[in-house]
Amino acid sequence: MTLLGMTVQELTDWVTAQGQPKYRGQQLHEWLYHKGVVSFAEISVFPKAWRELVGDEIIGRSQIVQRSPAPDGTVKYLLQLQDRLTIETVGIPTSDRLTVCVSTQVGCPMACDFCATGKGGWRRNLAVHEIIDQVLTVQNDFQRRVTHLVFMGMGEPLLNLANVLSVIRILNQDVGIGQRHMTVSTVGVPQQISAFAQAHLQVTLAVSLHAPNQELRQQLIPSAKRYPLTQLMADCQDYVKITGRRLSFEYTLLAGVNDAPAHAMELAQLLRGFQCHVNLIPYNPIAGVDYRRPSAQSVQNFARILEKLHIATSIRQTRGLSASAACGQLRSQQERHDPQKN
Ligand code: SAH
């Protein structure tokens, strides 16, 4: 059992079952979600004898095993979970925001060809408290409120949908992050986009497209063979109809693979009339993979073609490259140094 992830009512039930007065439920809630305590012993308003009896494991916090700051202020953390597996999380500050990029799984089964996490295989889904912990860890370390959240760390969020939905609710209601400041990124899992739509949230859904046609897409994304582009696009249309919300498409640009003007034109054709926004991500090089990052010029050209064809487009600024903070690299480096770790 873990306290992190419980609502104020559940915490109140727990403290009373422990023979403590009811109001300690509210106190526990405050210390867990606002003060961000990592151990039960720290909750100084609780009787010492009770704190010793309960022990620290029950909170459900991880340990920072590596902290890698980049010159741009981005900090990447390697966190160790209670079963000793490790995950990454990233804090990305700007003057008026602190964004956290959270992981939803240990590893990922989708195996996208250009993704460091995909190369490392899949271990398990993260529990609700293990995702919330990442946000609180960044918040504590930066000594600043987390304002924005992207589910773009390790793993495929829609393969862990029930937990992701609970996390969104808790971070919204208990930690105080606006749903409109959250983005869930998916490569697409059959049936799950419509399940996500049915939750009627205010969060943004970002779909990783990476190619304007089925043939190229399935070369880059093996799971696309079981979820053809026509079906994915139909599910995205339904998502917009059901939620009334605009959708984002992510497109990682790989030099000489999917970044030609013809690809941009084909992409504009595919998205014509769609209530959407395209986010171009210049490829972040990862070890052991042959793809190349396109020049700034060719990224600009690609964007310009889309815009001329009336597709709202932005280019994602790369943050934290020097800290290996871009995409799954900290964990794979650690594993190379210490293959016994996991
Ligand atoms: N499983 C989710 C979240 C993945 S990470 C998804 O697929 O959407 C968020 C985005 O970064 C995805 O679009 C992913 O394809 C992209 N990405 C992964 N590795 C990358 C790399 N090395 N360079 C650029 N983008 C990458």
Image: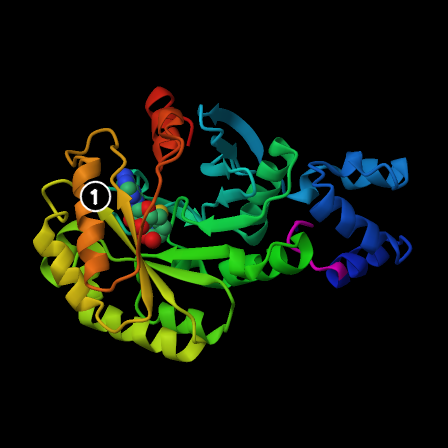
The image shows residue 341 at horizontal and vertical percentages of: 42, 27
Going by the picture, which residue comes out furthest to the front? 308
Few, some or many C-alpha atoms within 10 Å of disc 1 (few <14, some 14-19, many ≥20)?
Answer: many
Residue situated in front as seen by the camera: 198 or 105: 198
State whether residue 124 is above or below residue 285.
below
Residue 84 placement, left or right of 54: left
Residue situated in front as seen by the camera: 137 or 71: 71
Residue situated in front as seen by the camera: 267 or 22: 267
Q: Which residues are magenta?
A: 2-8
Q: Residue at x 50, y 56 (%)?
A: 182
Q: Is residue 248 magenta?
A: no
- What residue is shown with label 1? 299
- Label 1 near ligand 1 (CB < 8 Å): no
Residue 52 placement, left or right of 252: right
The image shows residue 141 at horizontal and vertical percentages of: 61, 32
Q: Residue at x 32, y 24 (%)?
A: 336
- Residue 56 found in image quarter: top right
Q: Is residue 127 visible?
A: yes
Say which element carries label 1.
Answer: helix
Q: Residue at x 55, y 37 (%)?
A: 95
Q: In the rendered structure, which amino acid carries the disc numbered 1?
A: Val
State whether residue 212 is above or below residue 71.
below
